[in-house]
Amino acid sequence: MKTKILALSLLAVMTFALTACAQTDVVANTAVKSFETVLNTDASKVTRSADGYVLTSPNTTESFSFGKNIAITFELAPFIEAGLDVTKLPSNINADGDNLVISMENKDYSKETTANKTFEKLVKNNRDAVGYHAALDHYGVALGNGNMFEWAKDIATNDKDIVFVLDPQAFIDMGVDVENVEGWLFAKVETMDNGKKVEVDKLLKPYNIK
Amino acid sequence: MRETFKVMGMTCAACASRIEKVVGKMDVVTSVSVNLATEKMTVETDQSKASIDDIIKTVEKAGYKAEALATQGSKTLKIIGMTCAACASRIEKAVGKIDGVISVSVNLTTERLTCELDGSKTNMSAVRQAVEKAGYKWAEVAGKNTVDDDKLRKEKEIKTLWTKFIVAAVFTVPLLYIAMGHMIPGVKFPIPSIIEPMNYPLNFALVQIFLTIPIMIAGYKFYTVGFRALWLRSPNMDSLIAIGTSAAVIYSIYATYKITQGHFMFAESLYFETAGVIITLILLGKSLEAVSKGKTSDAIKKLMGLAPKTAIVIKNGVEIETPIAEVMVDDIILVKPGSKIPVDGVVVEGNTAIDEAMLTGESMPIDKKPGDKVFAASINKNGLIKFKATKIGSDTALAQIIKLVEDAQSSKAPIAQIADIVSGYFVPIVFIIAVLAFGGWILAGHDFIFALTIFISVLVIACPCALGLATPTAIMVGTGKGAENGILIKGGEALETTHKIKTIVFDKTGTITEGKPEVTDIVTVNGIDRQRLLQLVASAEKGSEHPLGEAIVRGAEKENLSMLPVSGFEALTGRGIRVTIDGAEVLAGNLKLMHEQGISIDNLEADAHHLAGGGKTPMYIAVDRKISGIIAVADVVKESSARAIKRLNEMGIEVAMITGDNKRTAEAIAKQVGITRVLSEVLPQDKSNEVKKLQAEGKKVAMVGDGINDAPALAQADIGIAIGSGTDVAMESADIVLMHSDLMDVPTAIQLSKSTIRNIKQNLFWAFAYNVAGIPVAAGVLYLLGGPLLNPVFAAAAMSLSSVSVLTNALRLKRFKAYK
């Protein structure tokens, strides 16, 4: 009996040890690899900034920054036209000239030599913010309050290679008619909430970068 | 030759059926019967003991273990430390050299030494010493009368099953929580983010694998036995569980591999918890089943527990406490007041009263003096006695009763045949249904996961155990309950036939009546005192061997009358006796004697006529040639006879009485007990013909008799019921033996048979209904009709419940109450 208890305890310890192992974090590992594919698809859209790197959308109106901060930047004008009252911007959304910026701090950021290494570090340090979106076969970095930047796990088979995702409720609260924001798609998206499938409203701007 | 084996490793009726098939194919085997509930196999062979090893090997080849149960009259030891045939040979030589060893045989495969000893020369201690001297160790083997080893084995089995279940449950609960907790609608069960399925799908899968491994280890027997049976092309219940859960685990491992390849959606296609829960639930079912099965043999355990474990043997004037297994025939045994008699024997010294209720049901202790027989397990009430052992081990009356009950419990009733036939084909058919359902749903356009779920559910819900247990468990409880009430039913067939009995024929003498005539009436005339008359006749008949004379002597003794000196005794053949007492001539005899002697009986004629009409035998007494009175003697009806017959009539059973007595006497007795159909003046040899005539009327007939002179009729009847103690020869000739002399046991036996058969029918109905309904539901018939799809987990729960429910139903028979 004692042997059995010992064997089972060992098994339990092994379980936790193995699950803590980075090698078993297939989502993080594949997220990094697939983002590297996105970065390599059009190197001209990846630029180095003072505090990291920026991936710009094909039409240059949106960008995803990953450096000292992790942020998405998008044009302000379509939102103004759809009724945005800039005086009502919440603390996590900032106006920066003609753009709006949603950002969060990149934990334990340190400057890396390449965009890929920078992103790898980002995933490692902000693992909780990185996830897999099964419905679209996407990975994503969550910027808080339902705002995200997503990219396809396999851009060869996905027509939405990168997607800027906004929480529409915040914009509704600022007077935006979310169904009429030019260039943005207001849609229901299937996602997981603590293991359960749920459908949520989102404002999406997908790009095919191939 | 008939051999009995203990068979281990059977899990369902398919196993029993498989063993019967393979053993039945052996050339030397003429018949074989395997009882799943008792785990015993009875084999009839046309060869000597040499075939036992072959039978054991054949059973082992089929994937099970078998062990020959000790042959009657022999002693067995387990030998430890043998490695090859040379060891066996060495031990045989060493033991064979002992003076008094008649034969010795050592079986290397079963590690058993079997020997026959001449008790006057040696004993088992010498055998053990010889084994040790030869360099080997020994251990006791459970004999037929030792309950402890079997009890320990059962307890260990139950403990092991519970431990396995607990281990499985401990890992299944978190497994189920992690895998399914989040799927319960309306409830938010948190799980650590590090194993959250969408963010850490591989961790999610790995944790489940690690939780599943101990569960599979706990249920490893399902895989070893199941796959082995499959390999031997004799799939059983374990095969179904093994295939079902393996399919779930293998597919989940494949899904885990896909996760490592980046296909995270496979995190939703893990079925480890299905396998885990199935194994856990079936282990729970098996544990409950083991507990319930143990309870079905309570009666035999009680009987076995009656025998003491040691005896005080007197050797060379020294009292030695000796294990019961070492007591030999002719040993002188000392029994102190309050102790149990260890073996059967004859009292050689001392007087006592012995409680033999366990054998005869007689509640009053019976006086014993030198020359009287004593029986194992009876209780010495007050005196210190010494007795000589005459029957030991399996020859004692108690051992024979136990054997009879064991044999009955191991036997099969004809009603079991249908279940046996179905069980033989059940598992392969279920497997085919599962494959067809899987293929069918795939062809219908459903995905692999859907079809796999169906496949697993069909395999797991099918329950051959319920079918296999339906009949033997009820027979075990039924025959055991009978034994508890002093009703020994000799087998499943007898138990089944008894409930169909429409007519019962009772023998009169010793069955309806006490079989011992008694003084019933004393009529006096011409001024003589009643007691004086009885005293005179009893004194005259003292020493008579005639039943009437004996009855009168007993009658006087009951009234504490002293015997008077008698002279001039003259036996008048066929008429009576003549004696002289206190100078007076006393004539005692029949009417003929009185007429011969010219003694007028006019004033007593009416009384005599009346007494004869009541089935009594009047004896005329004349003192000094003057009629003095009549003493009537009759075989009195048992206190329970009328009640028993009334009960039988209420049960719709026709009751008849058969006797060699004249019509008038027979009718008088029949009237007393309420019997209307009387078969009188039937010679003993013609009794069986009368039973035949009743059978020719298309009725199932039972004959109730004392089992000696009624033997042919008992054999002719569909059911022969013998009344007598366990020591009686009746045990050989009858289908049912009533240990007590209470006739109420007859309606009780019939009612017990009815209850048992009803219970078997209920069990079979539920076992069949469960499988007939469960398999289509598992195959997705309800889903086809717009209903839900059965989860394999619920299929496993239902399967476990089916066996437990059959056993629970069988155990209800324990509540059966005998008629009083």
Image (cartoon, coloured by chain):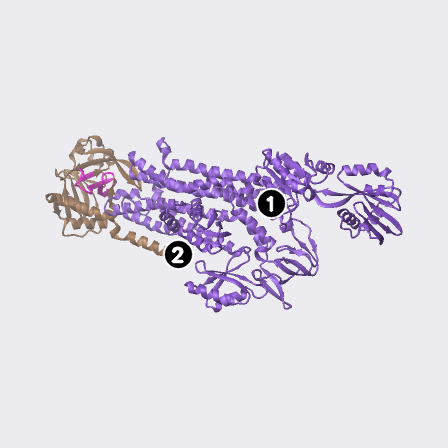
Task: Give the colour in which the image draws chain B.
Answer: purple
x, y percent for residue B90: 45, 66
Residue type pointed to by label 2: Ile
Q: Who is closer to the viewer here, B530 or B762?
A: B530
Disc 1 crowd, CA 10 A, few/some/many (<14, 14-19, 20+): many
Chain of the residue under the numbered disc 1 shown in the image? B
Residue pointed to by mark 2: A5
The answer to whether residue B270 is above or below residue B543 is above
> On the rendered structure, is B670 left or right of B536?
left
Q: Who is closer to the viewer here, B87 or A134?
A: B87
- State the SS at label 1: loop
- The answer, for residue A177, to whether it is visible in the render is no
- State the SS at label 2: helix
- The answer, for residue B149, to whether it is visible in the render is yes
Q: Who is closer to the viewer here, B554 or B602?
A: B602
x, y percent for residue A205: 18, 36
Q: Who is closer to the viewer here, B331 or B163?
A: B331
Disc 2 crowd, CA 10 A, few/some/many (<14, 14-19, 20+): few
Q: CA distance from mark 2 to mark 1?
A: 56 Å
x, y percent for residue B163: 43, 52
Quarter containing the N terminus of chain A: bottom left
In the rendered image, residues at marks 2 and 1 fall on the same chain: no
In magenta stretch: residue B623: no
Residue type pointed to by label 1: Ala
x, y percent for residue B124: 54, 64
Residue pointed to by mark 1: B734
Q: Magenta region: which residues? A: A135-164
Which residue corresponds to the image point at 54% horizontal and 40% vertical from the top-left? B496
Q: Which chain is brown?
A: A
Which callout, 2 or 1, points to the residue nearer the camera?
1
Quarter containing the C terminus of chain A: top left
Chain of the residue under the numbered disc 2 shown in the image? A
